[in-house]
Amino acid sequence: MLVRAVVLPLAVLVCIGPIRAQTEVVVIISGDVRLEDGTAPPDAVQINRVCNGRTTAETRTDTMGHYHFSVGAGNDGTSSSADAGGAPAQASDLNKALNKTSTQYTNPVTTALRDCEVQAVLSGFRSESVRLSIHDTSDDGRVAMIVLHPLSRLAALTISVTTAAAPASAKKAYDKGLEAIAKEKWDAADSELARAVKVYPKFAVAWYELGIVRQKRNDTNGAVQAWREARAQDTKYIQPYESLAAMADAQQDWTAAEHYSREWLQLDADDFAAAYLINAIANAHLNRVDAAELAARNGLRIDKDRRIPRLSYVLGLILMQKQQYAEAAKYLHAYLELAPNARDAALVRAQVARLDQQAEGHAPH
């Protein structure tokens, strides 16, 4: 699939509503996401608001590439609603304002938003950020474009080619499902997404989102079934492989975890250290020690920033099993340096102490 950069023209509309006296407003932020050729992205794009270093997941685009969300008065600048689908907003600390003084009256929402940025997030792309330059209620808030730059072939794997062929009725149901997800209305989301895949059974992205919704509803079997359908309808769409592997790992179904993580890595062996972690753990439980060691080492090879400390721990345990104690101690020490406050840190420190004793020629207790 051709990977194209995604362009996000962002328009901010400030709507004044006297909710509490004359000092508070509601700010509606809206925009459209487009590919470079002017078409909408085939999958939903996450829209985040970043204020003073804290990120709030606001909404996601609909199938037309449009989104909007509002930031309401009286709630410290946190979102009051989100349309077009997406994750629920999180609490945001909006206390710092820009130095420019408002030419109108002071209000808590526009003051808070002066130190905020909007980002578009799509797996496999690098996002630019756009500052929300809302200084007072007279601003129309129009800002520059956000461009998402493709990082690697991962970008092609996170978009399903089946979306473009979805009929309008299926896309409409899918959009309604995303709106329900944004409001955490899981029953409604399940109903709309189920309608979307009934109209268009090849709708891989809708199947995937349906699995997420069913997982939220604690319907594990239904979630797995939906993700398997997503995988069957588009074998190059990587998201269901990740969910299936993670679910199998959580359920300690090591055969399934090894299978799905291996398929995940066959699609992309360069971008997902978490896939190597699941594969290493599964192979270790299946007594395939050499395969487990190889997976852990490959995971560490691509995890250059050491964002997954547990890879070091798992490799250390595998090396202990192979009686390679000196190297095992090295990786366990690395794990403790990366995650000193981990829940199992005390246990790992005891293991390291025994290994250090052995390295000094003393038998461990």
Image: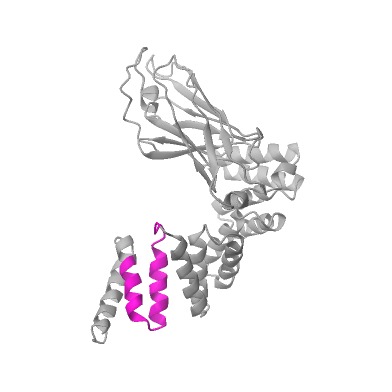
Judged left or right of residue 352, residue 89 is right
Is 149 placed left or right of 176 in the picture? left
Q: How many marks?
A: 0
Q: Which residues are magenta?
A: 305-334
Q: Quadrant of residue 35?
A: top right
x and y, in percent, of residue 337 in the image: 30, 63
Residue 243 in the image, given as x and y percentages of width and height:
57, 57
Residue at figure coordinates x 50%, y 22% from the top left: 142
Q: Nearest the camera: 245 or 221?
A: 245
Give the left or right position of residue 3, taking residue 50 as reference: right
Q: Does the magenta portion include 313?
A: yes
- Residue 266 versus residue 206: which sits nearer the camera? 266
Where 30 sits versus 341, above or below? Answer: above
Residue visible at 33% across and 19% down in the picture = 100
- Residue 10: image x %, image y %? 53, 28
Q: Which of the 4 image quadrants contains residue 104? A: top left
Question: Which colouring convention does the figure follow?
Answer: one colour
Question: Horizontal and vertical percent for residue 180?
Answer: 59, 39
Q: Main secondary structure of the magenta part?
A: helix
Q: Is residue 8 visible?
A: yes
Q: Residue at x 52, y 72 (%)?
A: 282
Quadrant where the C terminus lies? Answer: bottom left
Extreme residue in the top direction: 104
The answer to whether 329 is drawn above or below residue 219 in the figure is below
Please check the rendered image and state whether residue 64 is part of the magenta-colored stretch, yes or no: no
Residue 78 in sight: no
